[in-house]
Amino acid sequence: MTSIKVEMHLSALFEEWSGEVPTLILPLAPSGSHRIYYRLQSKSRVAIGAYSPNEKEMDAFLSFSRHFREKDLPVPEIYAENRNQKVYLQEDLGSTTLYSYLLQKDDYFPDYLVQIYRRVVEDLAKLQILGGEGLDYSVCHPRDSFDHQSMMWDFNYFKYYFLKLAFPEFDEQALEDDFNRLSDYLLQADNSHFMFRDFQTRNIMIRAGKPYFIDYQGGRRGALQYDLASLLYQAKANIPDDIRMSLLQHYMDTASGLTDIDRETFLDYYYGFVMIRSIQVLGAYGFRGLYEKKEHFLKSIPHALRNITWIFEHIDLKVPLPELQRGIMAIARSKQFEPFDRIKGSSSLLTVTINSFSYKKGIPADSSGNGGGFTFDCRFIHNPGRYETYEKLTGRDEEVINFLKHHSGIDEFMNNVFRIVDEAVENYIERSFTDLMVNFGCTGGQHRSVYAADTLHKHLREKYGVRVVIRHLEQEAKGWKN
């Protein structure tokens, strides 16, 4: 369905629900799925609108949401739905995720963040145990439980999209034997509660200090340990070991008040679920990073690898996984996924100058005397400037950024830019070159080129630590007034 039709159907549903015509329909940042989200607002009402092309996922989410709300669990209220057009409205929980808190922390894990996590694990236990009681598991998609088939899907995802691409020299039959042993072992755990399936910080909203959960449409019957492992061993969270253990104990304290738990048995299976979740995550990172070449996911691979190597080095898993261990440890020792040495980049002679410009004014001259560098033409990308809503905005405004991410190929374009520019940057650092210029042009130098230049600036600073000078030629000439 086209974005125009989605917005039309959501607008009609909003008017039917609220009795008011929405004055704002703002696309929100895309998720990892095919669902599309908008914030709709009128004079007195606001809601999050969603388009879900997968009907079974939509049915599961709506059914679970209503069930959880009846039990006073922290999930969004469902306001209205139109199943024929695959759209629905839900409560607006704001824009602050637990992940955004992680981005704000430095190298230490502050106490306020620990307190938020304590509240999260308390509410997780309630969602799993109380929310699982009386739940209609017949609407689950694609399986109604985290069974052997589900586990083998995750194992194969890891094998084909990560291991075969990163470490092709392994004994496939021995690895399959490891997978089957781990699956058989984990299926002996209590699998009678609700399993969120993707319980990580991007799916936890924080409003007025209270956590709320979203995106549980992949939920099914399963073991309590899986979701806790997903949260505490999320690759880029880097939760210190002592805090992890404290949160694990706090979770068990809460869960023990809701159902019978043998702590020793719970812990035995817990680390097995940490292992299978970490394997699933590496499969996802391999698909998005190694196969689709998306930089963001490549950056996360070292964190996920460290989680698995830590388990092999410190935990008695109760089930032997020799071929899996051999492959993982070989990849870790190779350091092929370790990030670039930012100290080397920051101490280099290189300065990267990034310009956004308007093709109406011409390609910028290179004042370094090197005759120019890369120039990328953004004019083929869907232009938000064609729409009245975005005419006076720039590529730095949230509305424009979300438009580009939802309704253009900007992310794929930038991934291609990264691959080209990164190779030059690394080469220039090694050869002690002093200057590299990168230009992004579009029709007016206002939307697409501004976003592209800012995105590359952030990427180079984070990955290499090199000195970057950024200039938005058209916008600076106009004082950012359009």
Image (spheres, rainbow, N blue to C red):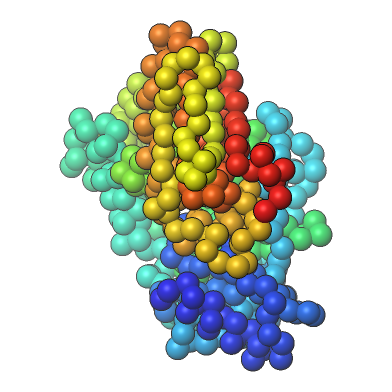
Q: Residue furthest front?
A: 361
Q: Residue 53 or 111: which is nearer the viewer?
A: 53
Residue 162, quarter of the rendered image: top left
The residue positioned 71% from the left and 91% from the top of the image is: 19
Residue 402, placed above or below residue 462: below
* Residue 232 in the figure: left or right of residue 368: right
Across and down, in percent, residue 482 comes to 67, 53
* Residue 332 in the figure: left or right of residue 45: left
Q: Residue 360 or 212: which is nearer the viewer?
A: 360
The residue positioned 43% from the left and 24% from the top of the image is: 372
The residue positioned 47% from the left and 72% from the top of the image is: 3
Q: How many marks?
A: 0
Q: Residue furthest top?
A: 432
Residue 141, placed above or below residue 408: below
The residue positioned 42% from the left and 25% from the top of the image is: 373
* Residue 337 in the figure: left or right of residue 65: left
Res. 277 in view: no
Res. 147 in view: yes
Across and down, in percent, residue 78 comes to 63, 80
* Residue 342 in the figure: left or right of residue 371: right
Across and down, in percent, residue 348 comes to 53, 11
Q: Residue 314 or 40: which is nearer the viewer?
A: 40
Across and down, in percent, residue 224 comes to 55, 58
Residue 417, quarter of the rendered image: top left
Q: Quadrant of the N terminus?
A: bottom left
